[in-house]
């Protein structure tokens, strides 16, 4: 049976490389037909904010990596509901074209459903 | 059941808080590296979950004493904790 | 049991790689198998042959190499992360027109797919974050 892989994304974009390298790992896995699910938690939810203009700091826009997810078969992205609340983010502000966003209230139960977890 | 590993100090990182927010009954928490500073000062009162383990090498290195409700373990026991739990989730930064 | 380790920390910069090396030794001592050690993010510096710590400090690169020699470990350095940070094999250096390669013996450069593959083929996956 295929193992279920979760990528736990806890970093805001741009301030350090982990947000980008995490998404790159997920895309690479998906390209090899080993799709990982994603859970954005903590500052990781900031990756989902729309209207990022990364060129202002001479970086590539991380939104492009997110938008590539559905192309590689990652159709649902999971978001920790509590993390949004803590940061005053309305789930309605978030969207990834082609992907469904699913709010997770009980992250412990959600994580327990996976065979391996990569933390980013 | 999940083994959570926290490696950053609760005084500088949200790693422990985020971990506790995702901790279910039957899970275990292991504090390693700077994560062991959770055993010191007011942060230790935030640890209302159990069981909690800490790497003795890391507490020794930092001159910390280990509260009674925390189990100090060596590297061999760390390995067996990993075999007894799945998945293993690391919380850092 | 079959383990894979993922390491994000550069040697001598955070404790991540040192903890991972100790954990790897403990695993092997207990008869477990290490399917792969995957060096990612700043962890790619573990594969630099140019690391030269003072003599009274633990040489982590040498530590990985000796473990690799004894147990035929699969030490994989992520090629994309390594190119960004300046860890190159001789052939990569040539291809990218850089003055020299510096990938340490015992390590190999490979793609990110090896990380997903490690997750799929191991009983346990453990991340050593930095």
Image (cartoon, coloured by chain):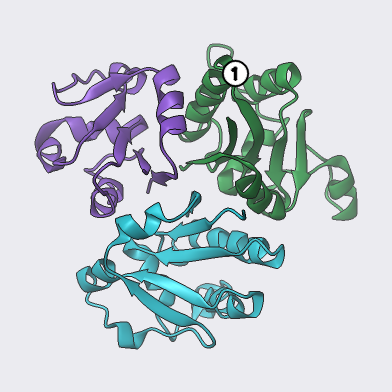
Chain colours: A cyan, B purple, C green
- Residue A17 visible in the displayed image: no
Residue drawn at x 45%, y 67% as measured from the top left: A13
Dividing the image into 4 quarters, which one contains the N terminus of chain B? Answer: top left
Q: Chain of mark 1?
A: C
Residue drawn at x 56%, y 19% as measured from the top left: C25
On the picture, is B51 further left or further right than C94?
left
Give how far across and how far down residue B71 sits, in percent: 24, 22
In front of the other: B84 or A120:
B84
Give how far across and how far down residue A101 sits, in percent: 41, 79
For the image, the number of numbered tags is: 1
| Quadrant of residue B35 within the rendered picture | top left
Give SS at disc 1.
loop
Q: Which residue is mark 1?
A: C31
In front of the other: A30 or A16:
A30
Give how far across and how far down residue A18 sits, in percent: 50, 56
Eyeballing the image, is C76 above or below C71?
A: below
In front of the other: B37 or A60:
B37
Name the outermost residue toward the top: C56
Circle 1 Cα neighbour tier, 10 Å, few/some/many (<14 / 14–19 / ≥20)? few
- Residue C38 visible in the displayed image: yes
On the picture, is C107 further left or further right than A115?
right
| Quadrant of residue C102 within the rendered picture | top right
Residue drawn at x 77%, y 44% as measured from the top left: C109
Name the outermost residue toward the front: A1
On the picture, is C120 further left or further right than B14?
right
Give how far across and how far down residue B64 sits, in percent: 21, 21
Eyeballing the image, is B74 above or below B9?
A: above
On the picture, is A89 further left or further right than A98?
left
């Amino acid at each position: 049976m295929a193992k279920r892989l979760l990528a736990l994304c806890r970093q805001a974009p741009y301030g350090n490389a982990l947000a980008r390298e995490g998404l790159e790992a997920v895309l690479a896995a998906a390209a090899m037909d080993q799709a990982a699910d994603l859970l954005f938690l903590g500052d990781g939810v900031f990756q989902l904010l729309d209207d990022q203009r990364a060129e202002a700091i001479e970086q590539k826009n991380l939104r492009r990596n997110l938008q590539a997810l559905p192309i590689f078969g990652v159709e649902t992205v999971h978001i920790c509901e509590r993390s949004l609340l803590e940061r005053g983010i309305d789930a309605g502000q978030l969207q990834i074209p082609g992907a469904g966003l699913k709010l997770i209230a009980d992250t412990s139960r959600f994580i327990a459903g996976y065979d391996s977890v990569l933390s980013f | 059941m999940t083994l959570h590993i926290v490696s950053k100090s609760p005084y500088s990182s949200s790693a422990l808080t985020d971990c506790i927010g995702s901790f279910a009954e039957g899970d275990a928490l292991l504090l390693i590296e700077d994560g062991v500073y959770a055993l010191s000062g007011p942060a230790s009162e935030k640890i209302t979950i159990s069981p909690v383990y800490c790497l003795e090498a890391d507490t020794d290195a930092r001159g910390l004493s280990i509260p009674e409700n925390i189990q100090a373990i060596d590297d061999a026991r760390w390995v067996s904790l990993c075999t007894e739990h799945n998945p293993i989730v690391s919380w850092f930064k | 049991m079959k383990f894979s380790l993922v390491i994000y920390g550069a040697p001598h910069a955070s404790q991540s790689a040192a903890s991972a090396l100790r954990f790897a030794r403990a695993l092997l001592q207990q008869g477990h198998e290490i399917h792969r050690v995957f060096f990612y993010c700043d962890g790619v510096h573990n594969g630099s042959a140019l690391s030269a710590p003072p003599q009274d400090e633990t040489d982590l690169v040498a530590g990985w190499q000796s473990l690799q020699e004894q147990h035929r470990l699969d030490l994989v350095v992520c090629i994309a992360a390594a190119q960004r940070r300046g860890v190159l094999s001789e052939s990569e250096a040539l291809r990218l027109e850089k003055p020299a390669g510096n990938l340490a013996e015992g390590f190999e450069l490979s793609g990110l797919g090896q990380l997903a593959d490690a997750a799929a083929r191991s009983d346990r996956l453990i991340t050593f974050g930095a």
